[in-house]
Image (cartoon, rainbow, N blue to C red):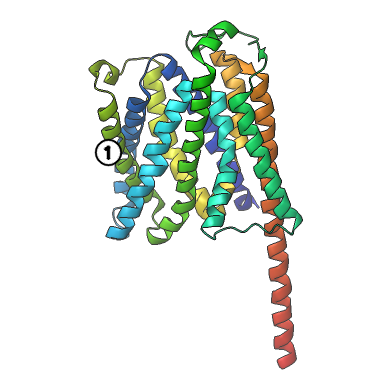
Amino acid sequence: MMDGKKPYLVVILIQSIYAVTYILSKAAFNGGMNCFVFTFYRQAIATVFLVPVAVIFERKRAPSLSFMAFCKIFMLSLFGITLSLNLYGIGLVYTSATLLVATTNTLPVITILLAVLLRMETVKLRTFSGKAKVVGIILCMAGCASLAIYKGPYLKPLINTHLLEHHNNEEDLSVSHTTRTWVIGCFLLLLANIAWALRLVFQDRILRDYPSKLLFTTLTCILGCIQSLVVAFCIERNPSQWQLHWDVGLLAVAYSGIVVTGVAYYLQTWCIEKKGPVFMAMSNPVSLIITTFSSYFLLGELISLGSVLGEILLVGGFYSVLWAKSKEQTDDNKDFTIEEGKDCLKVEEAT
């Protein structure tokens, strides 16, 4: 009984870890830390943390790594880590932690669309579950539009306990988050989600060629670290931006590198292997709830009516797709049981 609940407990833990890193990352960027440098340090710390662990536990049973498998892992790191994390960073600078985690609720839609294109998933439009999937996609699109275009009045923070001092009134917010930068940020976050969805979909296939989850995670971190260094060095040449200090920036880098990249990625790989990529993507509303409350009370971020409406639409679409996926799995199991019973009956008749 407990084994059946493990994937659900693990995804709650993963989303809680992600929620904390969204808050810490936003606080670090508010303090002036460069997002590209942050991504590199995050991957570097994760690599330093994971390499000794992988050597200790996997050195005697490491599977052989073919050149083709290495190329696949390299491309997965390029899109799923380097590109997605840097786009997340820029989008977070332009918007807010709440919006970042809200837009991740498009992951189920993007993941399913990619899975359909790759024939890993089907949408049966004639069934009620298939129609529910379509409704979920429409709700997610409407939610994204609401987040990007409509703001409306703001909800005032109830307390003023902030990790960092920054703008926390409507006039200042209108200056720091103009309509243009807000829309650009939403677009970049959407691209980041597409890159992340590619990682979720193709990771399951690559693990069939290279089944060691720990070595796979370590190798993606190493490659992501090298790729992120190249990107950060090409964009940021100011030495002062590369210096780490004893502040929230260092805390965000250490937490993101060790806990998120080092621990959450491994747990995510485990979940994908057990329940598939769509199941992993379906757990995002947990981090949305945690991040919304944390941003509101700790960072003092203002939440607009448009953001609330957009989040409601996204979560509604999320659960519509979740229900459709669950219904399809139940129907498939019933069909399998019926067919199995018919086969057994045929065998008995033959004997």
Image quadrant containing the C terminus:
bottom right
The structure residue drawn at horizontal position 65% and vertical position 44%, both measured from the top left corner, is 137
The number of discs equals 1
Using residue 90 as the reference point, say whether residue 48 is left or right of it: left
Give residue 302's quadrant in the image. Answer: top right
Residue sitting at the far bottom: 351
Give residue 309's quadrant in the image. Answer: top right
Vertical relation: 123 (above or below) 44 = below
Residue sitting at the far front: 180
Looking at numbered disc 1 in the image, what kind of residue is underneath it?
Ile
| Residue 158 visible in the snapshot | yes
The structure residue drawn at horizontal position 39% and vertical position 43%, both measured from the top left corner, is 79
The structure residue drawn at horizontal position 42% and vertical position 19%, both measured from the top left corner, is 29
Give residue 108's quadrant in the image. Answer: top right
Q: Secondary structure at mark 1?
A: helix
Q: Position of residue 159 (x, y in %)?
A: 62, 8
Q: Position of residue 164 (x, y in %)?
A: 47, 11
Pick whichever, 50 or 90, lies toward us.
90
Q: Position of residue 348 (x, y in %)?
A: 73, 88
Q: Position of residue 131 (x, y in %)?
A: 72, 52
Vertical relation: 336 (above or below) 233 = below
| Residue 259 visible in the snapshot | no
The structure residue drawn at horizontal position 39% and vertical position 40%, both measured from the top left corner, is 81
Residue under label 1, please give it: 226
The crowding category of the residue bearing disc 1, from other C-alpha atoms within 10 Å (few below 14, some 14 to 19, many at least 20), is some
